[in-house]
Image: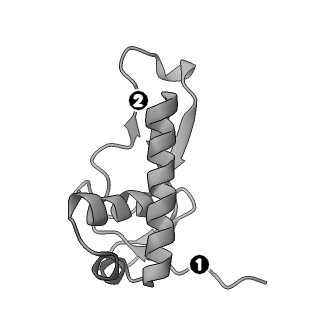
Amino acid sequence: MPRPRKPRFVHGNPMADIFKPRGIPARELEEVVLPVEGLEALRLSDLGKLDQETAAGRMNVSRQTFGRVLAEARETVAEALVMGKMIRIHGGSYTMPGVGRRCGKGRGGGSGREGF
């Protein structure tokens, strides 16, 4: 039996939960799912310009786990951009420090849309 997944720290809910190509109705698009912790990894690494060790510490995971989450998130975003798919930001295994409750398996978390 595998070890339970340790929740990753995420410092706020996403500002939006769907991105799609302009001019195409959502019902006509294929979609990819980007977990909330994948978005957080992109935010810390690509937007925040943090090295992987520092970013991993902020998410309360090992550097190797952070690298894997980041690589999966980048692959998901690249697939959507290149193939014209909709990105749905949803689910994952994460918690928000100071909120005191665990989120994951499709549930949101936190008390608003702060942080991103």
Residue 10: image location, x then y, percent = 34, 69
Q: Quadrant of the N terminus?
A: bottom right
Q: How is the image coloured?
A: one colour
Q: Is residue 25 left or right of residue 98?
A: right
User: Taking the image as drawn, is residue 95 in sight?
Assistant: yes
Q: Quadrant of the C terminus?
A: bottom left
Q: Is residue 109 above or below residue 23?
A: below
Viewer-closest of 29 and 27 = 29
Residue type at the position of mark 1: Arg
Viewer-closest of 6 and 32 = 32
Residue 102: image location, x then y, percent = 46, 74
Contact (Cβ within 8 Å) of mark 2 with mark 1: no
Mark 2–mark 1 Cα distance, whole angstroms, equals 30 Å
Which mark, by number, is residue 5? 1
Q: Secondary structure at mark 2?
A: loop
Which residue is at 55% across, 18% downward? Answer: 28
**What residue is shown with label 2?**
20
Few, some or many C-alpha atoms within 10 Å of disc 1 (few <14, some 14-19, many ≥20)?
few
Residue furthest right as drawn: 1
Q: Is residue 26 left or right of residue 59?
A: right
Q: Is residue 40 above or below residue 20?
A: below
Which residue is at 31% across, 57% downward? Answer: 13
Which residue is at 21% across, 66% downward? Answer: 49
Residue type at the position of mark 2: Lys
Viewer-closest of 101 and 69 = 69
